[in-house]
Image (cartoon, helix red, strand yellow):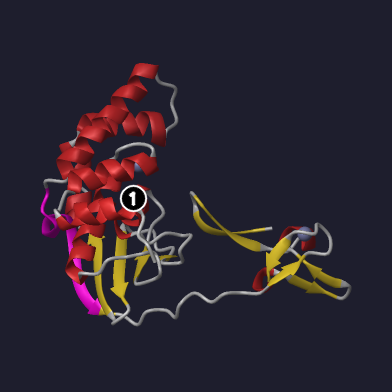
Amino acid sequence: MPKNTFRLQVEEMIEKQDALGLLKKAGEMHGHLCNYLAYGVMAGLYGIRKLGVNNTGMEEIIAVVETNNCFADGVQMVTGCTLGNNALIYRDYGKTGVTLSTRDGRAVRLVLKPEFDDTREKEYPEAYALFNRLVARREQGAPEDYGKMMRLFAEMSVAELGVPAEKMFVISEKTAALPAYAPIFETVKCQSCGENVMKTRSVKKDDGVYCIPCAQEEYYELNGGGIVRRS
Ligand SMILES: [Zn+2]
Ligand SMILES: [Zn+2]
């Protein structure tokens, strides 16, 4: 399978341990530069180098992320394990951690060290004060406040790349049984809206097959609050 240029560039940066280049690339996808994005980049970079495997998006590497904050985007960009290529598994633990595994069962888990995580606000008081005001409490701020906050977090993200991985993460090497390759499911048609739907997500009723919304069934949604049940 031919490799795309984007992935080749990423692999070259991994090879050269170009964390800043990777962070900038991650920022293009993520929309901004922030410290948790940088932690995801660092975790991905460390893990990929440790396991020594390249990823073509065919599930050679599986990433199990334990959070859906900015960290997860850094991991996705560097590892190439994404939601769409089934190599990203989301476990709703609410921890800034990731386990990378290869097909031969080698795995490495990195989780943010509490003593590192807990001291960020003290080390970057100005950025966090703005964050708490404008994002956490959703207080109205002047446009220049937002600009300043974004700039401070971008600067912070770059500075954090200089922290050694061992100081940032609890790192454990382990063996992991990888999940089977993602199965390919049959497609069926909802008899109400006519849209195609994966058979495993279709709802069988006495008079035929429906999709979840037409059948008004409950479902799970991954949103800012984690995985939640909706109906
Ligand atoms: Zn972010
Ligand atoms: Zn339908």
For image coordinates 15% across by 39% down, the residue present is 159
Q: Is mark 1 within 8 Å of ligand 1?
A: no
Q: Quadrant of residue 140?
A: top left
* Residue toward you, 56 or 223: 56
Look at the numbered disc 1 and give the secondary structure of its residue.
Answer: helix
For the question of whether residue 119 can be seen, the reply is no
Q: In the image, residue 85 lies at what x, y percent?
A: 45, 63
Q: Is residue 171 magenta?
A: yes
Span highlighted in magenta in the image: 163-174
Residue situated furthest front in the rendering: 2
For image coordinates 24% across by 30% down, the residue present is 152
For image coordinates 36% across by 55% down, the residue present is 4
State the quadrant of the N terminus. bottom left
Q: In the image, residue 209 lies at what x, y percent?
A: 80, 70
Q: Amino acid at mark 1?
A: Phe
* Residue toward you, 158 or 60: 60
83 left or right, relative to 27: right
